[in-house]
Amino acid sequence: MNLVVLTGAGVSAESGVPTFRASDGLWEGHRVEAVATPEGFAANPALVQDFYNQRRRQLATVHPNAAHRALADLAARWTGEFLLVTQNVDDLHDRAHADTPPAPGFELIHMHGELKKARCTASGVVCDWAGDLAPAHASPHHPRGTLRPHIVWFGEIPLEMERIEAALARCDLFVSIGTSGAVYPAAGFVQLARMAGARTVEINLEPTQGARLFDEGVYGPASETVPGFFGTL
Ligand code: OAD
């Protein structure tokens, strides 16, 4: 049986990583356009680098929770294909899987990039990055390049879309965990899974606006609902 799981900010919320869509419309006190668009970066690189430097530093203070661990346990025992697609730029899935090595059919894709990576603006080379980035950080990969966060900003194309869509086209079960379904293309994955004839399940704190697109909904905190749901598979 082939499985695709999509995760969003809700899976990391109980680890202490804030979700995006707070009622004030701000993201940690900033307008989204200021810190999550190419135009925002061009206008004020110091602000944007500092914003992601802070997020990167925060990773040292958070840890995978029971939902991340339940997905890692599932990946270790799943015998079919299992694609875990996360919209999260934190490294909590990666850390959970490092503790519990996955079976060969498993793959993790960070479709919106990763805080722990940087990208050269001239060559496109992506490298691991653990520290801070300066406003015009010289790139080791190209004489005219600078390093930017390896984050997909609004107006940019999410990563690995071909592989994700191919996996959705052959999946038997699609589970969407802790995402509001407000951002495309991830919000459209449930329709692609339905077209493939998959069973579709939403796991969230509460029904989202797109809840009716799913066959089933499981509602409550991810640290309880995710181990509960996958424990029965
Ligand atoms: P949102 O902040 O839009 O949605 C978070 C979802 O998690 C909501 O539906 C909550 O109900 C749910 N939630 C919160 N706490 C939960 C818990 N403890 N257990 C289960 N569910 C919980 O976050 P995303 O949908 O991930 O893009 O946002 C999608 C994208 O928008 C992000 O990847 C980001 C942002 O702009 C980029 O950074 C490129």
Image: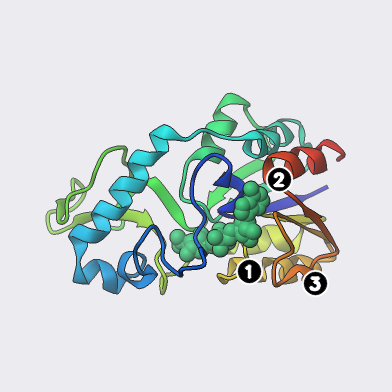
Q: Amino acid at mark 1?
A: Ala
| Rendered residue at 65%/32% (across/down) | 102
Confirm if mark 3 falls within 8 A of ligand 1: no
Which numbered disc covers residue 212? Answer: 3
Q: Nearer the viewer, mark 2 or mark 1?
A: 1
Q: Is residue 223 above or below residue 83?
A: above
Residue extending farthest to the front is 24
Residue at figure coordinates x 83%, y 47% from the top left: 1
Which x, y percent locates residue 68? 63, 38
Q: CA distance from mark 3 to mark 1?
A: 13 Å
Instruction: Determine whether the residue tagged by mark 1 lies in a helix, strand or loop.
Output: helix
Marks 3, 1: nearer the viewer:
3
Q: How many residues crowd around disc 3 within 10 Å: few (fewer than 14), some, or many (20 or more)?
A: few
- What separation in Å lies between label 2 and label 3 (alpha carbons)? 24 Å
Which coloring applies here?
rainbow
- What is the total number of numbered labels drawn onto the structure image? 3
Q: Which residue is mark 1?
A: 187
Q: Give the residue number, with chain letter if any, for mark 2.
A: 82
- Whichever of callouts 3 and 1 sits on the residue coming sooner in the sequence is 1
